[in-house]
Image (cartoon, rainbow, N blue to C red):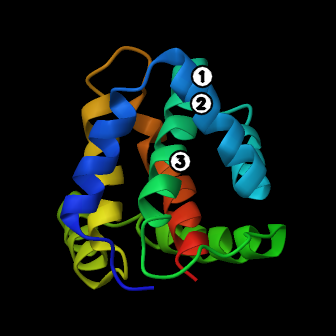
Amino acid sequence: MKPISAEIVETTWKRIAGFSAREGKTLAEKFAAEQPVVMTYLMAVDGDLFNEDERELLFYLGAVVWQMMAQGDAPLPQVTEQMIDQAEAANQATLESLVDASEDDARAAMAQMLQEYTQPEVFKYVVTALMEATQEEGIRDENLGVLMVNLKTVIDCLNR
């Protein structure tokens, strides 16, 4: 799949941010019908780690990512549990490699990952949204890396 443009990323998140509760429910139902494994993953992953606000943010950003990716040049794959497991393992290995890195090295690695990533605009949206969310009550800094890995896993699976 070709990279999703910054324009699509921006118009999609703005459109979804303006949804009413009813429109949000309809989107969630469509998400469940079209990508049930992704939705289940987002609802269940790291279940005891996240608080309610973090869980809601993960699901919301996952749905926005799905909508962004759905506007790509190819139909989205039907994501399987095996696809999720493989992508999550690869992303977890990357995260673990950064655990002992200095803050500057970690930032440099993140910048390089963003520059080389196959969906840079979608990933940039996720990183920006997560950073902004730490300023909101209920989103803990220590869970940002895990939230990012979970969302990158979704992007990786939808990008096949």
User: From the viewer's perspective, is residue 70 above or below residue 52?
Assistant: below
The x and y percentages for residue 137 are 36, 14
Which residue is disc 1 drawn over?
A: 51
Nearer-N-terminus badge (3/2): 2
Which amino acid type is shown beneath numbered disc 2? Arg
Residue ID for mark 2: 55
Question: In the image, residue 75 lies at what x, y percent?
Answer: 58, 77
Which is more toward the observer, 60 or 146?
Answer: 60
Work out whether mark 1 precedes mark 3 in sequence or the reverse, and give the earlier one. Answer: 1
Residue 103 to residue 56: above or below: below
Observer-nearest of 95 and 27: 27
Q: Amino acid at mark 1?
A: Asn
The quarter of the displayed image where residue 118 is located: bottom left
Neighbour tally class for label 2: few under 14, some 14-19, many 20 plus, Cα within 10 Å: some
Task: Estimate the spatial distance between the alpha carbons at disc 3 and disc 2, rounded to whole Å.
Answer: 11 Å
Instruction: Give how far across and how far down residue 77 sits, in percent.
Output: 67, 76
Residue occupying image coordinates x 62% and y 26%: 25
Where, by quadrant of the figure, is residue 89 drawn? bottom right
Q: Quadrant of the C terminus?
A: bottom right
Considering only vertical position in the picture, is 155 above or below 52?
Answer: below
In percent of width and height, residue 153 lies at: 57, 65
**Distance of mark 2 from mark 1, alpha carbons?**
6 Å
- Between disc 3 and disc 2, the foreground one is 3
Callout 3 secondary element: helix
Residue under circle 3?
62
